Image: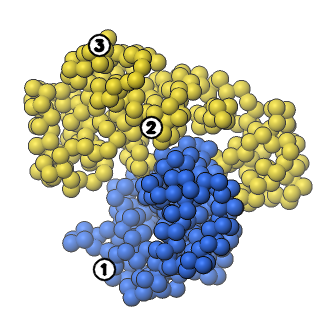
Chain colours: A blue, B yellow
Amino acid sequence: MNQQVPVITVRNLVKKFGSFVANDHLNFDVYQGEIFGFLGANGAGKTTAMKILCGLSSPTSGEAKVAGFDIYKETEKVKRNIGYMSQKFSLYEDLTVAENIRFFSGVYGISPSDRKEKQQKLLKDLGLESAKDSLIGSLPLGWKQKLAFSVAIFHDPKIVFLDEPTGGVDPITRRKFWDLIYEASDRGITVFVTTHYMDEAEYCNRVSIMNAGRIEALDTPENLKKQYSAKNMDEVFLKIARNTE
Amino acid sequence: MEVQKGELFGLIGPDGAGKTTLMRILMTLLIQDKGMATMNGFDVIKDYKKIRNMVGYMPGRFSLYQDLTVEENLNFFATVFKTTVSENYDLIRDIYIQIEPFKKRLAGKLSGGMKQKLALSCALIHKPEILILDEPTTGVDAVSRKEFWEMLKNLQQKGITILVSTPYMDEAMLCNRVALMQKGKVLDIDTPRNLVDGYTRKLYAIRSNDMHRLILDLRSYEKTDSAYAFGQYLHVTGKDDEVEATEFENFLMRKNHQNLEVFDIQPTIEDVFMELLGIEE
């Protein structure tokens, strides 16, 4: 992780829906290659903030830059420099492996000639060459997840947003998925991840915890545990989410 | 499998384990290809009408009427079962009281936690003897999950038999007994305590300053059998369980790991599940 190079900067970010304040003056930086855990209770405002950072929604006030681009004026450039994956939506089940790669390459603006070369390398790296023409729906979950993540970073984005990527997944597959996250981080890709598994919060370089639209805590898991005299992140989370209600 | 009267029984397993299919068969919403099942002694095929009257069901996907209000949904389900909200209010009071201030709100406009409470109230309004809950805590934050399990414990004390499914292994500990499921099969059924006690492998917790390098180093070590991340520690087993803590420690010190900790640890239900998955594969 490179502490010198922020790839996301957020200053006094506010998002209101009518009188409801979904994001209340958010301030934080995320650095290059960092694994940043974005936690919070349901309804705390995580999804709203993520949509803004992905260029899908405009804030009410405040500033934010993602991969160096302004989230008001340069949303198209933001989108080209990020990847996105969630457990709910990742790949099209009724398209083949190759068709999915082709589709997402198009979406992310990769030229057909680049695609062919990259696709070969990707399938080789994942050991999926023989499954090229298989429907996604027919693949085991572990392979599907690996592929979904690889597709989300196929265009070498600066940042990849992972929205509950491991929900409902068996415990071994869930852990293998974190191996992929670490590998991406080693390659310099910033990983911005939400999860309801508190053990996964421990795997992040830093963690922010939101409650009622505000960031209540932001630090390394180690420091948060000290600060809240908690023996694990589950306790930290419970203390923050229960105290401020 | 059998579930005893008054039991809080958990179906534990990831997506694709077959939890929902089993629940839908028990709920008489799906017919099995082979075999038989009874609910309170009634056959799920022949006696489906009787079963539907004595069972409450909360499906995984929110399936109340989004364009009816909270109050209207509850009245609707009470009427379908030929009862009234006031008749069985005792049963749902603790839960419903939390959403009552919003009773004029459309169900579709409720937050996730409130939808969950309304769905549970609707599943209980005809005073079922058996309650079936399909992944009620999936996608729910850690605090709301704890509160939901407290509600379940209260319902169990009122004599309701509860069958609940979850992909969260830690919730297994809150059940009287659990079935661990994977890919359509039951791997084991027992109390959580017995499952954990039945784990016979020698398990170590290991950590250092650089957790990612630690896991890579341990996996490259010829004496390591498995190394998985468990929160702030790795849980590690050695080949044939004959590797001592000091061997791991010496190996990792040679690899220059700082602030190294290696100690024996008791397994969690997740270790048990992962061991069963490993054997299965």
State the image coordinates of residue B209 (x, y, percent, origin top left).
74, 59
How far apart are labels 1 and 2 at the CA level?
38 Å
- Whether label 1 touches label 2, CB < 8 Å: no
Farthest residue, direction top: B41
State the image coordinates of residue A173 (x, y, percent, origin top left).
60, 47
Q: Which residue is denoted by mark 1 in the rendering? A: A60
At horizontal 18% and vertical 46% (from top left) the residue drawn is: B65
**Tag 3: amino acid:** Phe
Q: Is residue B267 left or right of residue B101?
A: right
Which one is in front in this view, the residue at disc 3 or the one at disc 2? Answer: 3
How far apart are labels 3 and 2 at the CA level?
26 Å
Circle 3 SS class: strand
| Subunit ID for the residue under disc 1 | A
| Subunit ID for the residue under disc 3 | B
Q: Is residue B20 left or right of residue B255?
A: left
> Residue B42 has which mark?
3
Q: Is residue B121 above or below residue A196?
A: above
A76 or A237: which is nearer to us? A76
Which one is in front in this view, the residue at disc 3 or the one at disc 1? Answer: 3
Q: Give residue B203's quadrant in the image.
A: top right
The total number of labels drawn is 3
At horizontal 43% and vertical 83% (from top left) the residue drawn is: A76
Quadrant in which the C terminus of chain A appears: bottom left
Q: Is residue A97 above or below residue B224?
A: below
The local crowd at label 1, few if under 14, some if 14 to 19, many if 20 or more residues have their Cα within 10 Å, is few
How far apart are labels 3 and 1 at the CA level?
58 Å
Q: Which residue is denoted by mark 2 in the rendering? A: B166
The local crowd at label 2, few if under 14, some if 14 to 19, many if 20 or more residues have their Cα within 10 Å, is many
